[in-house]
Image (cartoon, grey):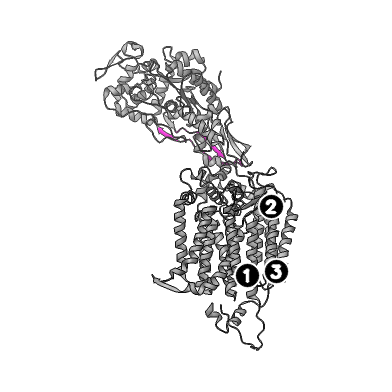
Amino acid sequence: MNRALFRLSLAVLAMFVLLLINVNYVQAFQANSLANRPGNARTFDEQFQYQRGSIIAAGAGGPKTIAESLPTKASTTGNTIYQRHYPDGAIYAPITGYDSIYGATGVESAYNKDLEGTASGLAVHNLISLLTGKAKQGATVNLTISPKAQQAAYQGLLDTGHQGGVVAINPSTGAILAMASDPSYDPNLLTTFDGTQLNKVDKRLLTDPSQPLLNRAINQTYPPGSSFKIITGSAGFSTGKVAGPQATISAPQPLRLPNGNFLNNDGDETCFGGNPQVIQAFALSCNTAFANIGIKVGGPTLRSYANKFGWNDANLTIPMQVSPSVIPNITDKSFTAMSSIGQFDDQVTPLQEAMDAAAIANHGTLMKPYLLQSIQAPDLTTIDSTTPSVLSQAVTSQVASEMQQMMVQVTQSTFGTAYQTAGPPAVGTSLVIAGKTGTAENTVSGAGLDDAVFTCFAPASNPQIAVGVIVKGGGFGAAAAAPIAVKVIEAYLGVH
Amino acid sequence: MTAISSQPSAPAAESAVALPRGRRRTELLMLAFAVGVVVFAYANVGFGLNGKLPSGLVEYGIAFAAIIAVAHLAVRRFAPWADPLMLPLAALLNGLGIVMIYRLQESGRGGNPGNQISTISSSTTTAQVLYSAVGVAAFVLVLVFIRDAKVLQRYTYTLGAVGLILLAIPAMLPDSMSEVPGTGAKIQIAVGGFSVQPEQFGELALAVFFAGYLVTKRDVLSLAGRRFLGIDLPRARDLGPVLIAWAASLLVLVFESDIGTSALFFGLFVAMIYIATQRTSWLLIGVLLFVFGAYVASKLFSHVGVRFDVWLHPWAGDNPTHNAYQTVQGLEGLGFGGIFGTGLGHGQPFWTPLVQSDFIMTAFGEELGLTGLMAILLIFGLLVQRGLRAAVAARDPFAKLLAGGLAFAIALQVFIIVGGVTNLIPLTGITTPFLSQGGSSLIASWALVGLLMRISDTARRPAPQPIQDEGMTQVVRAG
């Protein structure tokens, strides 16, 4: 029987080896995938047992905490866990996004590794924490957002009663000072630990016809309307097809297009007898004058200048992905004429509107827009910060200065389209805003309500802020959009 | 065996295998180590849960040490030549089981984090310590009353009948008395608040029966019938016993919904028939019958089919939240523990249903990690190895067969339950020897170790000095 016992011992050995291999497989190799299984009750608390870093609006008027993690008790285990809290959630939602048990959006998602403390830049810090027995903690993300400007932008949008988006940037750096979207949502609704409750809220927000989760400042496009004349004018000066602001240009009413259709000025009004200076046509926003410039420049060339201002760029991130603003590639003269006054198939985001003005304000140099000022480890050492970078040289400083003169006339000339709402009657004489209005026919909104657009920078002599505003169905750009830009500028500069 | 014992020199050679010392001091040292590990682990639970020494550290520590001391003294008195490692291994497992049950009992109690486990009351740990005392008493009684395992051979058929009756009782009782709450398995006799799982003792009785029966029949069972694919098949008329055992185990499965015990009994029988006859064909026949039976059962009985589905597709559809919930919780617990574990008191084993009994190994895996789980598996492996060593050393064929069977039973039981909770094989609920909450399993395990130590003691006891002096002649080991 000993031979059988010996063989049976081998079988027993094999059984134990199988068990040992299997537990090794489960505990060493599968541990990660098991931890990441949806519904894993054990790792659930763990995700929230460390304090996630705060998000700070560190621009002018700040610093203001716009996202933070506060300790609470887990209902199942009694462990201390941290729940996300967003002070003034709706105002900053397009920036912060939210961090829920199912995933994150916005800055919460873009800098997730830093916020949760797993970024490679935090490795040394984490090691020291481990050795000194301190709890792991996420890094603080400081944003360029100015609480004053953001508050004014969101309140301005709310007051219109229409949907829309506002972006303000610092022209010389590209730092984003405000980014508001209306309607917004309260991200605090999405920080619950109750999956069923979260599903309910998530479904409600997703099916809401007003699309509160949509960041209209960077992810929704609208027709630019007359604000596109900044690009058309820049292209005209840069190519030499238009000698300068004082050159005259033919502006008939109406303009007969090559395809036989007629293109009209706003209200079918004549424009300085049909032969204005370019600067006059710009201030009064004569469509036929700029349609003529567009035809002279030509569709493809016009588009290439738009691209220098950042249009048609599908890869721009701030770090959130920005929807590209679109100028279609057209050679047909009639369509080029319509495109050069911001109609036809032109599409623009509020951010792009702000970038157009910022490039002109910054001597023709377009800075890459960004949100991140710096990331601070829990020990307050800076582990990352943004160095402003040039996105492109949109136009020469000569052309930029000519465009600045024209944009000043929009608010300062008594016949300028924004004289009443962004000129001396509205802001006095000490502050000069340079801007351009747009009132875009919008087939989508219908009911005769045009989209109101305003893009500007201020102060004109020493630009510190560029603002792009689009109010969907708001009507005249000067009436609906310009006042919001004025409020943002005044709040940011601290005047009034 | 016949071949060996027919040689006149064999007894002398066998006696030389046994060491000339009883090695009780080694045992005492190892026991002190085991008690130390257990007390340390218990203190660890207190720190893990509350950040301070647990209440009852001294009381539980002294109680456990006293219980183990009684066992050691009994071995010194009644089985001085027995294997020195078995008792420390059993004591360590028993102690770790108590520690883990205490840890689970403290979940959700007294402001501790963690959910309270509904089937555990505040007196569970005390009860488990008492069961340990009863278990050691059973161990001592085995050593006192069974002075040589051979005497059991006289009661072969009596014990066979007792084993079958113990196995069958729950099937005949109403569900309210026999069903383990929440499992659907009819394996206990519950009267008042007290319950016994008779199959745990039935297993021992049947092992004795198998040994006695097979020792007398093995010559017949060894006879070769046809030769097929290079294997000698037994004669058809000799298939009777194995078919009866197979049918009995299937009946257990059908009437008591207890797949694990059914597999355990049948596996034990097949292993013992193999030891007795050395015929590989019996192993093959046994495995084939088992696979066939399991397959048919999975088709006929939904509760068996579900086990297969959970085994193969634990993450599919709504399995993780329904049928496979327990398995998935166990696996996620193991994963949570990772390589070094969360530390005692720092894991969340309370998520896993029945973590205090069938799934206790996943709690160890979670809190002691892969390292701890492997260490416990190796303790079981060592215990089985010492048992098989006793079987090899035993001179009496009955004792040899019984020891081999009992050692294999431990191995198979560990394989079935640990393989089940780690999803290596389909999950079948049986207790983990020495670790799981509950008295029946613990007491039966102690009695089993008592039998193994008795057989070891007999085997290692030096033979009477031969009259003829063999001088300086070195005896060659026949190992």
Look at the picture and state if A112 lies above or below B367: above
Whichever of labels 1 and 3 marks the residue nearer the N terminus, that label is: 3
**Disc number for residue A181:** none
**Disc 2 residue type (three-letter):** Thr
Seen at 58% across and 80% down, the residue is: B477
Q: Quadrant of the C terminus of chain A?
A: top right
Q: Chain of mark 1?
A: B
Seen at 33% across and 20% down, the residue is: A290
Whichever of labels 3 and 2 marks the residue nearer the N terminus, that label is: 2
Picture coordinates of residue B466 (x, y %)? 65, 85
Picture coordinates of residue A232 (x, y %)? 35, 24
Highlighted range, magenta: A368-392
Q: Which residue is mark 1?
A: B152
Q: Chain of mark 2?
A: B
Q: Quadrant of residue B134?
A: bottom right
SS label for mark 1: helix
Question: Crowding at label 3, few (<14), some or many (≥20) Cα neighbours within 10 Å?
Answer: some
Relative depth, front residue between B366 and A311: B366
Q: Quadrant of residue B91?
A: bottom right
Q: CA distance from mark 1 to mark 3?
A: 14 Å
Question: Crowding at label 1, few (<14), some or many (≥20) Cα neighbours within 10 Å?
Answer: some
Q: CA distance from mark 3 to mark 2?
A: 28 Å
Residues at marks 1 and 3, common chain? yes
Q: Is residue B294 magenta?
A: no
Q: Which residue is mark 3?
A: B144
SS label for mark 3: helix
Q: Which residue is mark 2?
A: B125
